[in-house]
Structure formats: C-alpha cells, structure tokens
Image (cartoon, grey):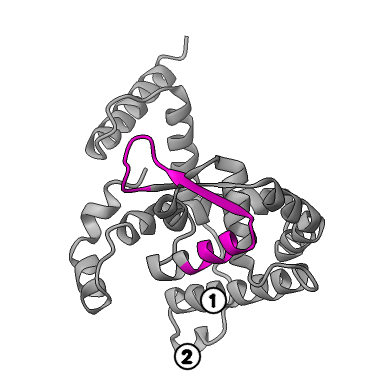
Amino acid sequence: MNYKLVKDTIQLLEQFEIEMQEKGQHTCDIKDFKHWIANSFREEVSIQEPYWEGKEKGRTPESAINTLIVHMNRYAKTYSKSAIHNSDFSTQEEFIYLINLRAFGAMTKMELIKRNIQDKPVGMQIINRLMNQGWVEQRDSETDKRSKIIHITKKGLQSLDKQMDKIRQATKIVTGDLTHPEKMELIRLLNKLDHFHQPIFSQNIDSAELLERVADGNLSVKNKIQ
C-alpha cells in the first residue's frame, strides 16, 4: 500500500474540512469534496491572460468584464426584440415572467419580481400588463391575505408557446459559437457572480449608500459563497 498517498489524502481531507467549517458548511459529502478539489486544481493551473481592449493602457480586468457584460445584455435584448416581433409581447420581460410562472408555478407578485431581479415599481408594471392581456390571473394567498398569488392562464400558455420557437432560437444565438465545455464553465462563473450579488440585491439598499455598504460588508458576503 502506498502509505504516502494515504497520508496526503488524509491531509487533503483535513484541509477541505477546515475550509468548509470556516464557511459555515458543517455537513459535506463526497460530491462537495470533488468540487473542492476541482476548484482548487483549477485555481492552481496557470491560465494565460487574454487580451482586452485598453489593457496596454492599464485598463483593469474588472472594467473589461463590466463592459462586456453590458454588451452581452444589449446583444441579448436585440435578439429578444426580434423574437417577439409581430407578436402580442411588448418586451422581453413579459415572456420571461411567463416562462418563470410556467417553470416554477404560481407565486406572489414580489417573489416573481425578485426572481427577475427588478425593482418593485417596474415589476408591478410588467405584471399589470400581463393581467391586462389575460395572460396571468391573481388570487388571495391562503397563508397571507395581504399577498396576491399569480399564475399563468391558458391564454398565457398559448401566447408563450406560439413564440417559444423564436425565443429558443434567440437564446441559442446569444451563446454564439461557444463549445459545450465553454458553456458549462460560463454557467459556473455566472452562477458564482449571481450568488455573490443576489443577497446584496435582496436587501433593497438605497442607491445613495449602496456602494459604501457593499464595500464595508464585502468580506461577510464572500464568506457565504461556496
């Protein structure tokens, strides 16, 4: 038996356990251990830095990432606009709301708005448009009479299904010529960013103090990310 390998493996498990406990994750399984090893190895591998516009003039990678994310959002909106051309949909948010209701079932208005990462006034306008079209209906919540539960109607499903082929085509075009492994890696990275920002967004911090409060609480937020 290779006792050195066994010893190294035990030390690796000890390191894994310590890091998980520091993150507040006390119940881990072999799947968590595999992910931890994979992420650790990925960080150790030397990755050649790509070029980004303005790099030679000192532009930071953070600046490039922010700009590229904004660009991707605009590209996606352009394709979505084409997907709903000559349909009853006015914006991409309308069919995204319906897709969420079909996928996750009935929910409160605020749950639907938060799922789509939007402010309450904007989200309520979208929901009202959906109700005016007869695509969603609302009823009183059985657990909280102050809340309204909304669900997609048969008419909403029909309107969504009518447009789904073009919507799927648009989503496929947005991912461009990425290979399957590249798509999986992009999902992993975007999920990591989403897990960082979602708890901050859910606090509804006023814009005037958002940057300062996030900067002050950065470490506590990061510690919650696995």
The one nearer the camera, 45 or 94, is 94
Is residue 129 at least partly visible in the picture? yes
Which numbered marker is on residue 120?
none
> Residue at label 1?
70
159 left or right, relative to 125: right
* Residue sitting at x 40%, y 17%: 6
The Cα atoms of the two marked residues, 2 and 1, are separated by 21 Å
In the image, taking residue 88 as reference, residue 72 lies left or right, namely left
Q: Amino acid at mark 1?
A: Val
Q: Are marks 2 and 1 in contact (CB under 8 Å)?
A: no
**Does 135 sit above or below residue 19?**
below
Q: Is residue 108 left or right of residue 154?
A: left
- Counting from the top left corner in percent of width and height, residue 112 is at 47, 53
Q: Return the residue nearer the eye: 68 or 204.
A: 204
| Residue name at image x 78 percent, y 73 percent | 85
Looking at the picture, how far across and down is residue 220, in whole percent? Answer: 21, 53
Nearer-the-camera pick, 170 or 31 = 170
User: Which amino acid type is marked by label 2?
Assistant: Lys
**Front: mark 2 or 1:** 1
- Circle nearer the N terminus (2, 1): 2
Q: Quadrant of residue 11?
A: top left
Magenta stretch: give its range. Answer: 125-147
Residue at left offset 36%, top offset 29% = 12
Which residue in the protein does label 2 denote? Answer: 57
| Quarter holding residue 197 | bottom left
Dot 1 crowding, Cα within 10 Å, few <14, some 14–19, many 20+: few
Residue 188 in the magenta stretch? The answer is no
